[in-house]
Image (cartoon, grey):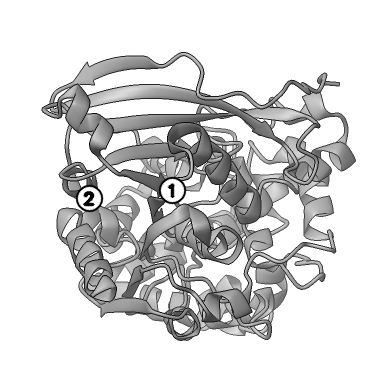
């Protein structure tokens, strides 16, 4: 088993600086407690990358306020910038940007099928991962902030799950915040809106999205029905070792949450079948593209911890998306084929069968089951404190977001004092990327208007 480090939490350590066209990048490493309730216990290492406009002089750079970017996920490392682009281009006009690899992701102490066995068996692994939710990420940010700039507050930009973290930040450590910007990441905070309610709202959105896709690309409905028939009779394995079952195929609906996702799905389906000596089979190009969409090798924490991001009432999540799916029989692909109906695809959901089909998740089966059955998850949000909030907050809400329910987001916006919203159907969930500079500029304007 891995030996625990109990050294005193360290500062940023040696800083490595490199140049890119238009950018100056600096690498930081921080040692933080695994369990912030036991600060003298085991430490894990976090990585963050500072990004500054190359034309900023040393003195000018030092005067810039900080903006920390919290990536979507859970389980995704921060952006790896190459030059100025989109939202980052706008941010660099006036900020030093810190791109944080949240615990367990990117260059921070990794948590995956290769490293988790160092913790011990499934029980030890699940206990370890119980410290990887938004509340711990907020405490990480606070330690990093104090080590970088002392008592001065900074601005947080939260994308998707990063927005969930930002609302947790407002709940637990608002003194560290100068302003909060949220892109497609206002979580449900009403105690009555549990994980099951989140997925009961999600399945109708998934249905709307896939039917709209079939209306745009009518031939795709027939291709998907053909794929369901094929997978019912043939075993197909993707290039990464994942077994492509019918439910796994349906997860391609995940693509429909982005602005170009419908077009990407259409082009992927075009390559589905090739003629062979044994009859039509899935083409290698198709299998490789599907593997890239469905793979969890780079983001195992997404599957292990996604449902826990909605858990704070002491109850187990117990594979909520799988249980709730049974309430929506229209998603039965076999029945849809029999009745010559469109096969509905799913979106941002995790299911227990993935522990068998997905190559990167098989070694973590028992760990995932323990996390799904875990009770006693602590609170992520403080609704009373949010109702008294004084930190300027602006949020863009995407009108028919596949991944985050619009009605839940609007209810949360009303519950956070002083939060200003921009509701738009111009973008899908990836609006901070697709809209880039314009989206961030709008959020900053809303915050400044809020300050008066």
Q: Nearer the viewer, residue 150 or 254?
A: 150
Instruction: Name the residue: 59% across, 72% down.
Output: 334
Label 2 crowding class (10 Å Cα cut-off): few <14, some 14-19, many 20+?
some
SS at mark 2 in the image: helix
| Residue corresponding to mark 2 | 87
Instruction: Name the residue: 68% across, 82% down.
Output: 191
Q: Which mark is residue 321?
A: none
Drawn side of residue 211 relative to residue 192, left or right: left
Q: Are marks 2 and 1 in contact (CB under 8 Å)?
A: no
Q: Nearer the viewer, residue 33 or 275?
A: 33
Which quadrant of the structure image shows residue 189?
bottom right
Drawn side of residue 235 relative to residue 183, left or right: right
Q: Which mark is residue 71?
A: 1
In this picture, is 400 found above or below 301? below
Q: Can see residue 389?
A: yes
x, y percentage for residue 182?
38, 63
x, y percentage for residue 332?
60, 75
Instruction: Name the residue: 25% across, 59% down.
Output: 260
Query: How far apart are the two marked residues, 2 and 1, measured between alpha carbons?
Result: 13 Å
x, y percentage for residue 379?
71, 66
Drawn side of residue 116 relative to residue 53, left or right: right
């Amino acid at each position: 088993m891995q030996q625990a480090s109990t050294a005193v939490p360290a500062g940023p350590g040696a800083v490595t600086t490199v140049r890119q066209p238009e950018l100056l990048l600096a690498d930081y490493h921080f040692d933080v407690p695994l369990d912030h309730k036991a600060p003298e216990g085991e430490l894990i290492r976090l990585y963050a990358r500072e990004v500054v406009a190359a034309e900023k002089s040393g003195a000018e750079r030092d005067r810039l306020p900080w903006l920390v970017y919290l990536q979507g996920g859970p389980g995704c490392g921060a952006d790896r910038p190459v030059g100025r682009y989109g939202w980052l281009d706008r941010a660099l006009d006036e900020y030093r940007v810190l791109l944080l690899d949240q615990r367990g992701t990117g260059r921070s102490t990794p948590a995956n099928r290769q490293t988790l066995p160092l913790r011990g068996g499934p029980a030890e692994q699940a206990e370890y991962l119980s410290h990887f939710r938004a509340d711990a990420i907020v405490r990480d940010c606070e330690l990093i902030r104090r080590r970088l700039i002392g008592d001065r507050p900074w601005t947080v930009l939260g994308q998707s799950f990063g927005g969930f973290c930002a609302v947790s930040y407002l709940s637990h450590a608002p003194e560290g915040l100068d302003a909060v910007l949220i892109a497609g990441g206002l979580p449900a905070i009403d105690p009555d809106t549990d994980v099951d309610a989140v997925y009961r709202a999600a399945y109708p959105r998934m249905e709307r999205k896939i039917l709209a896709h079939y209306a745009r690309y009518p031939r795709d409905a027939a291709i998907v029905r053909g794929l369901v028939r094929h997978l019912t009779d043939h075993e197909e394995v993707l290039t990464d070792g994942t077994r492509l079952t019918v439910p796994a195929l349906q997860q391609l609906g995940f693509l429909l949450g982005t602005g170009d996702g419908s077009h990407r799905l259409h082009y992927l389906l075009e390559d589905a079948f090739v003629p062979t000596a044994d009859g039509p089979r899935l083409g290698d190009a198709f299998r490789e593209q599907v593997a890239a969409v469905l793979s969890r090798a780079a983001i195992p924490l997404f599957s292990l911890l996604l449902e826990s991001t909605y858990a704070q009432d002491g109850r187990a999540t117990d594979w909520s998306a799988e249980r709730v799916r049974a309430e929506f029989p229209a998603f039965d692909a076999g029945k849809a084929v029999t009745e010559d109906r469109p096969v509905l695809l799913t979106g941002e959901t995790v299911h227990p069968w993935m522990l068998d089909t997905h190559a990167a998740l098989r070694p973590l089966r028992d760990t995932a089951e323990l996390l799904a059955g875990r009770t006693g998850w602590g609170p992520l949000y403080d609704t009373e404190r949010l109702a008294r909030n004084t930190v300027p907050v602006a949020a863009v809400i995407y009108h028919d977001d596949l991944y985050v329910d619009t009605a839940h987001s609007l209810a949360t916006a009303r519950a956070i004092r002083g939060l200003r919203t921009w509701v738009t159907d111009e973008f899908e969930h990836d609006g901070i990327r697709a809209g880039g500079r314009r989206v961030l500029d709008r959020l900053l304007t809303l915050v400044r208007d809020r300050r008066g």
